Image (spheres, rainbow, N blue to C red):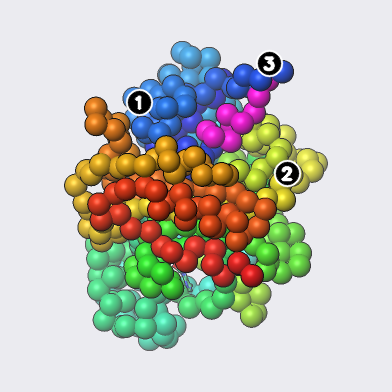
Amino acid sequence: MRILVLGSGAREHAIITALLRERGADGAPAHAITAAPGNAGIAEVVETVALDPTRGDVVADYAVDNDVQLVVIGPEAPLVAGVADAVRRRGIPVFGPGAAAAQLEGSKTFAKRIMDDAGVPTGRAVRAGTYAEVEAALDELGSPYVVKADGLAAGTGVIVTSDRTAALSHAEHYLQQGGVLVEEFLDGQEVSLFLLSDGHSVVPLSPAQDYKRALDGDAGPNTGGMGAYSPLPWAPEGFVDEVIRTVAEPTVRQLENEGTPFIGLLYCGLIVTERGIRVIEFNARFGDPETQVVLPRLVTPLSELLLAASTGQLGGRPHPQFSDDVAVTVVLASEGYPTSSAPNRPLTGLAEAAAVDGVHLCHAATAHTDEGFVATGGRVLSVVATGADFAEARSRAYEAIARIGLEGGQYRSDIAARVVS
Ligand code: AMP
Ligand code: GLY
């Protein structure tokens, strides 16, 4: 199949890596893949094209002109900008919701309204548009305080704190950008569960856990995600089926009934509380870094699933198969992430890291220069390791990341530590 993947992060590198694992009878890759715009790591394995992934007209023209058979949209920005709508209008299958359904991620107020109407369990929340409303909501819902930017904020729009002054100053910043939601604090383990949706039926992938805080022991600010592992040995019996029944199906049904079907990846961000499963957020796309640990374990060809979802053919499909291996990913970030940015710096030892058994790299913010790779942004790359158990996958990931040189580079040392028995 001729597949166009939009995006430039480690998530897109992981999606492309999974698609490249699919082989034809001659052993050659089964698909012709192009990434737009991709990144330096992606450019080592597939063709890249420098087009703006948030421009629906540009992407649709490219897809038509190049006989693309499937467009896979990685990040949220093109979804919210309506790129899926533009491509779908031209009759090309697209994995990714249109702008209306992408509001599930783009607006926390919209997501809460859908959940309320669909009867999906989530934390109690109050929308605040003024400072006084924030103060009243903080007092009503109590400490620890949870304040969320209403719109897209690249993983850093949420603060969870018992410091009322910090909660207020976070809110003040986002009030100028369209308002905030103050939410009830939910206590428990967090789970990311991805479900493919064709607008009507859903099919689950394997659950993962993301480490959102910057520092070991879940200290420091929220980030886009510093590491992840999958599967979850501690997940309650029947967990995935319960999420399908109480969260994913009602949500997808609600959007279908409103005439804005959700076609793509429904990312359910959940907390398993003592009172049951609660949704803390929806995203309208694969998670980063969770994708890096879910897709290496997927045995069912990814392209089949993405195409079936994009063409209304998920109904009646068996759940995808996953290998018995486990996977761990550790994110290497630049100095200062997520609060400040560092200049471009040399990145060494990538080949040595990838040479560790069971390890591969997914690039995010890297560039290729005459002197080799440099790190160009916050989250630089993900080191991904698979293994027979978490002890093995974890030691492989950390052996590999120790081989990478980046001045000021930082990573968490406790990813998946809790599941090593
Ligand atoms: P979100 O962007 O909504 O996923 O929030 C980012 C992170 O903040 C989550 O991964 C949680 O760790 C935390 N968080 C969000 N909402 C809540 C909540 N209601 N209670 C406790 N922690 C939360
Ligand atoms: N890892 C969190 C996200 O992708 O939003």
The Cα–Cα distance between marks 1 and 3, rounded to whole angstroms, is 32 Å
| Residue 320 marker | 2
Q: In this rendering, which labeled residue sits more in front, label 1 or label 2?
A: 2
Above or below, 235 against 124 in this view is above
Say which of 148 and 221 sits in front: 221
Does residue 25 sit above or below 295 in this rendering? above
Quarter of the image that includes the C terminus: bottom right
Could you tell me how far apart the alpha carbons at marks 1 and 2 are, in whole angstroms? 33 Å
**Viewer-nearest of labels 2 and 3?**
3
Residue 131 shows up from this direction: yes
The residue identified by callout 3 is 26
Number of marks in the rendered image: 3
Residue at the spot of label 1? 51
The quarter of the displayed image where residue 149 is located: bottom left
Secondary element type, mark 1: loop
Q: Position of residue 233 (x, y in %)?
A: 68, 64
Q: Is mark 1 within 8 Å of ligand 2?
A: no
